[in-house]
Image: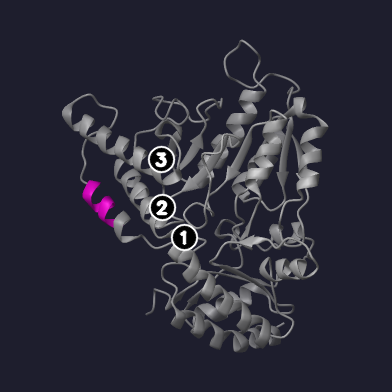
Amino acid sequence: MRNQPIHYFDHAATTPLSEPARAALIEHMGVIGNAGSLHTAGRTARRIHDAARIELAHAAGVDPAEIVFTSGGTEADNLAIKGLYAKRNAVPGSKPEPAVGKPARPRIIYTGIEHPAVLDVIEYLAQHHGAEPVLVLVTEDAVVDLDAWRAALAYAPERTALATLMWANNEVGTIQPVEEAAAIAAEHGVPFHTDAVQAFGHTPTQLNNPAITTAAITAHKLGGPVGIGALIVRRTAQLTPHIHGGGQERGLRSGTADVASAAAFAAAATAAQASLDQEIERLECLREKLVHAITTTIPNATVSGVQAAANRASRGGNSAQQLPGIVHLSVPGAQGDSVLFLLDSLGFATSTGSACTAGMAQPSHVLLAMGRSKQDATDVQRFSMGPLTTEESVQALIDALPGVIAQARGAG
């Protein structure tokens, strides 16, 4: 029985453990001491954890004191948005808890293409803590409208708790103008958070930008283990923690340090950054080959982001930047789940979008935010490439797709 895909095209969901990360994980899994203990074993664990923090900070280009380890990107996003919102609405001079009654800074600036780890937190704060979500529209290729972003921040900055914009979209792969958006937020004195989970290790990221208050990253998207991530928190940033206990991680995230995973995360990040330029070039070539094949062999197929950006460029607009490894396909009449299962039966691991929403019978919120219809947002497939992707795998996908799409269309 086959339990491993022959061709893995779901790197955006999770990546295979890289050899440097595997080596670090194996080396340190036997560490006995608690990094918070004062005896020799504890101090040994603490030294390993501190070294991992320093190495990860170097890979991210930030200060080690700005690294707050978490269980992953979802927790990092939660800590940032809930923490900033609560702190910005705390009663002056009191304990860092949200004020009772109507918050003084209820507004949260965001876009409709954010990851559920951001969208669901904003919805929670709106339902339970008086937040006022302010939606900023995106273009047809999933790029934030900076004029609308600027207007939203200028309208009532004194009533705005924070602004958040993901660095790169996990479904269609569009890279956002994060530096410009952060600078606009800073001009108005509004904290800025970015979900950089899909970007870090896959495209150049300037995470040391002082206009960026917090940034979420995670290990398993770049060759590290599942279950560990980090929130980059500026030294001047003020957040209210939502996990309490031993006061670890600057008091922002209590919990016993996962020493082995931290070391593996750092090793994976270092390796990813070292090979970044080479990997971008390799994946861009594979993406170009796949996109060309899709648009020339599959009737009425479109590639989100890439094709729309090319159309804008031909009209004199600025083309959107794309993550090198993501190809997002829309095929009218070919239901996404049907395409996924047909490809899976042939040994291809693909997806219809974020793994965090897989199995939910609903159209892609990202495509809807881009102006697509509900039907168009359902007839989609994401191919995300990475270390396991080869020329042979791409060619195999190219050979298989026309038949699979025809079969899916025939099934209705």
User: Which quadrant: the C terminus?
Assistant: bottom right
Circle 2 sits on which residue?
226
Question: What's the image's color scheme?
Answer: one colour
Question: Residue, x 46% and y 48% (percent of image)?
Answer: 218
Please provide the residue range marked out in magenta: 22-28
Decide which of tag 3 and tag 2 comes sooner along the chain.
3
| Above-or-below relation of 94 to 151 | above
Q: Is label 3 in a helix, a strand or a loop?
A: helix
Q: In which quarter of the image is residue 260?
A: top left
Circle 3 sits on which residue?
57
Circle 1 sits on which residue?
14
Give 277 or 286, whichever is nearer the viewer. Answer: 277
Q: Is residue 258 visible?
A: no
Which amino acid type is shown beneath numbered disc 1? Thr
Which amino acid type is shown beneath numbered disc 3? Ala
Q: Is label 1 in a helix, a strand or a loop?
A: loop
Question: Residue, x 52% and y 56% (percent of image)?
Answer: 203
Do callouts 2 and 1 mark residues in contact (Cβ within 8 Å)? yes
Decide which of tag 2 and tag 1 comes sooner along the chain.
1
Question: Could you say where residue 38 lies in the image, as x and y percent from the top left?
Answer: 23, 24
In the image, farthest residue toward the top: 93
Q: Is label 2 in a helix, a strand or a loop?
A: loop
Question: Could you say where residue 353 lies in the image, as x and y percent from the top left?
Answer: 61, 63
Do callouts 3 and 1 mark residues in contact (Cβ within 8 Å)? no
Q: In the rendered view, does 334 fall on the left or right side of 156?
A: left
Which amino acid type is shown beneath numbered disc 2? Val
Q: Is residue 337 visible?
A: yes
Q: In the rendered view, does 340 fall on the left or right side of 34?
A: right
Question: Could you say where residue 362 lies in the image, as x and y percent from the top left?
Answer: 70, 62
